[in-house]
Amino acid sequence: MINNKMGAIAGCAVLALGLGACGSSSSSSSSSGPTASGGGSGTVSGAGSTFAAPVYQQWASSLPGLTVNYQAVGSGAGITALESKTVDFGASDPPLKPADEAAIAKNGSPAVQIPMFLGAITVSYNLPGVPSGMKLDGKTLGDIFLGKVNTWNAAEIKALNPSLTLPSTAITVIHRSDSSGTTAGFTSFLAAVDPEWASKVGEGKTVPWPTGTGAKGNAGVAGAVAQTVGAVGYVEQAYALQHKFTYAAVKNKAGSFVSPTLESTTAAAEGVTVPPNLGIKIKNPSSPKAYPITSQTFVITNQDLCKAGVPGGESAAKGLGKLLAYGLGEGQSILSQADYAQLPASILEKSKAAAAGLQCNGSPIGG
């Protein structure tokens, strides 16, 4: 049984890497958008983002009669699972590429991507004696992950942190080994602020890492950082807090060094362009208050789940409707308990409309 405490939520996400199943418990219905009450009992299967896994498991625990079997296998694998019709929904942090939209539509119904919430991607480090808040900018981060900055007392890092006593400990880079939305968010930031990174490595769910050790999932990276003195890795904030990591304040586009908080994460979505397919992408946000490495995350499915032949059929379609209604309603108000941020109202209303448009054989699936 999961509750609303961050540690338990993140623990369930780790379980999801292997089993993907956390059960359900009591809930109350949402008063905004489609209601979270009624219908939707049964089992819904999903796969994808490890970044989003703690929240989906927590939301599922609040819905009576609904079991959500969620495999936290990475955004790329989640989209592939939906394309192959082995799950009822996929979960991805980057928006769909046109090729993925086309592949999902081949199931018999157009692809739909629904923004669900926001989260900070921390630059977490294992450096005893050095507190949270070490200042890092995009160029220095790029050089660390390029393998050009090899020790924690390197001149680049010392110049940004004159008041810190930095050890000569070797830097061990930990990165994702799987197709990952967290990687896409992190490398998108580096590509936007460091021309050398953009030309040599680029951005995406998988990239040709110049150095470092790979680990699977946010939980895998977090575990490797926790076990390695001198390590640095990029992990979603809930995982960083679960492991009591120290993490950096990162320089944003406005020139401010900002730590990841709920307020700075929400600020990162201010003014984001929302395209017709809702494929929003937060990349090097301009607000002076924004934490610059912030990611959105989506539920991906077909507009008519039953025509697309989702494995769970009508029961799963209605169950997904219930999960979405709760997540975009009451579920937004409890995101802070897991250190994730709500969608801005302008995006949230579009997400609710997209969820309300989902169907089973031409009929709304409801909530």
Image (cartoon, rainbow, N blue to C red):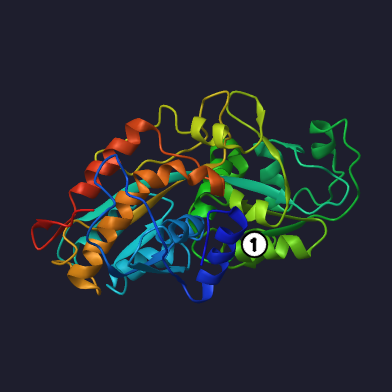
Q: Is residue 63 left or right of residue 267?
A: left
Q: Position of residue 66 (x, y in %)?
A: 33, 66
Q: Residue at x 14, y 65 (%)?
A: 108
Q: Quadrant of residue 310?
A: bottom left
Q: Residue at x 48, y 66 (%)?
A: 72
Q: Residue at x 59, y 23 (%)?
A: 254
Front-lying residue, 157 or 20: 20
Q: Is residue 152 left or right of residue 360?
A: right
| Residue identified by numbered label 1 | 221
In the depicted structure, whether residue 197 falls above or below residue 87: above
In the depicted structure, whether residue 276 falls above or below residue 18: above
Mark 1 element type: helix
Q: Is residue 37 left or right of residue 232?
A: left
Q: Is residue 234 left or right of residue 134?
A: left
Q: Position of residue 3 (x, y in %)?
A: 53, 58
Q: Residue furthest left?
A: 362
